[in-house]
Amino acid sequence: MRQVDELQQRVHGLRLADDVLAGGDLMRPALRELRRAVRLYREHSYADMTGRQMLRQIGELAQIAGWIASDAGQLEEAERIYRLGLSAATQAEDRTLAGNLAGSLAYQFANTGREVEGLDLSRAALDGAGPDAPPKARALYLDRVAWAHTKAGGTENAQQAMRALGEASQALSEDSEGIESPAWLYWVDAGELQVMEARVMTELRRPLRAVPLLRDVLGRYDATHTRELALYSSWLAVALADGGEPEESAAVAERVISLSADVASERTAERARVVLARLAEYADVPEVRAILDAAA
């Protein structure tokens, strides 16, 4: 159990590192920790309770390692890691953790051209966690369902996305001191739900709702979280372009590109490309032309 406790501390340390570092910086140490944990489980003997705790830590480690691999652009490796973690969480009989792993993989699918799989898996993650999952967990899973519907496209999916956002907000409002949440849910709060709402509104081309939300989020976001600042700024740039504000969009886009250059994240690199593609419609605007020329 001492080794399991030490592993738990290292896993949480890796989560905190991911708040300020990108996937390319953390890929090697994350995989090293995961291999070490799996080897510890396979090569030693222990009581059933200890084994279950170890499986739980392997599941948690696989979730953050899969997220890191995905951020680094290693999608096949990320999927393999997520599935390993899902197996560990299932063996540990931790339905909440299993839901997080399935939802994380669903999120990757939704963002990489596998929208139908992403939608199916995000729904399965929510249903599998069950009604007794901590409110924060249900809010997180519902957020992922909302995003999967958004990426799937179409009027019906847009309506389902809005419904899931409302349910996520309701779930979070039920969070109370009487229901303990796992440590890995430390980052799920009203601000994160606001971020997802803003992103959904941007993808649905509703800039009048997206822009105020994103300005509010970015106005109070931790400046040390460079990757997230670049990502959220990218949605603001797109929303401003959709709202017919190309000059302001160009100013935000310049910040996105500057921030992206400093982080080893495929997510931010892809978002920078999306922003530039959106701005191409306004290529005759001098401020936009300058950004496009500089990027070229």
Image: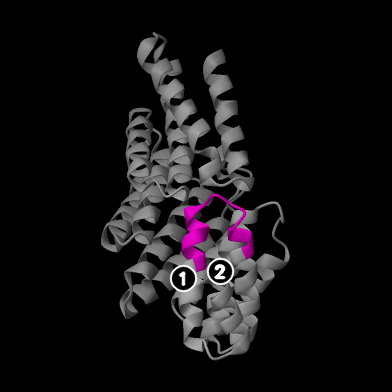
Q: Main secondary structure of the magenta part?
A: helix
Relative placement, left or right, of 54 versus 191 is left
At a point 44% along the width and 43% down the height, the residue shown is 69
Label number found at residue 28: none
- Mark 2 and mark 1 in contact (Cβ < 8 Å)? yes
Neighbour tally class for label 1: few under 14, some 14-19, many 20 plus, Cα within 10 Å: some
Q: Nearer the viewer, residue 74 or 229?
A: 74
Q: Does the magenta-highlighted stretch encompass residue 240?
A: no
Task: Report the magenta residues as a range.
Answer: 258-272
Task: Tell me if I can see residue 121 in this picture.
Answer: yes
Q: Quadrant of residue 230?
A: bottom right
Q: Give how far apart the Cα atoms at labels 1 and 2 are.
A: 8 Å
- Exactly how many numbered labels are in the figure? 2
Which amino acid, mark 2? Ser
At a point 45% along the width and 74% down the height, the residue shown is 203
**Residue 76, percent from left and from top:** 32, 44
**Residue 218, percent from left and from top:** 67, 66
Above or below, 259 against 37 in this view is below
**Residue 193, percent from left and from top:** 56, 62
Q: Which residue is mark 2?
A: 234
Q: Which residue is mark 1?
A: 274
Q: Does the magenta-highlighted stretch encompass residue 270?
A: yes
Q: Secondary structure at mark 1?
A: helix
Which amino acid, mark 1? Val
At a point 57% along the width and 83% down the height, the residue shown is 289
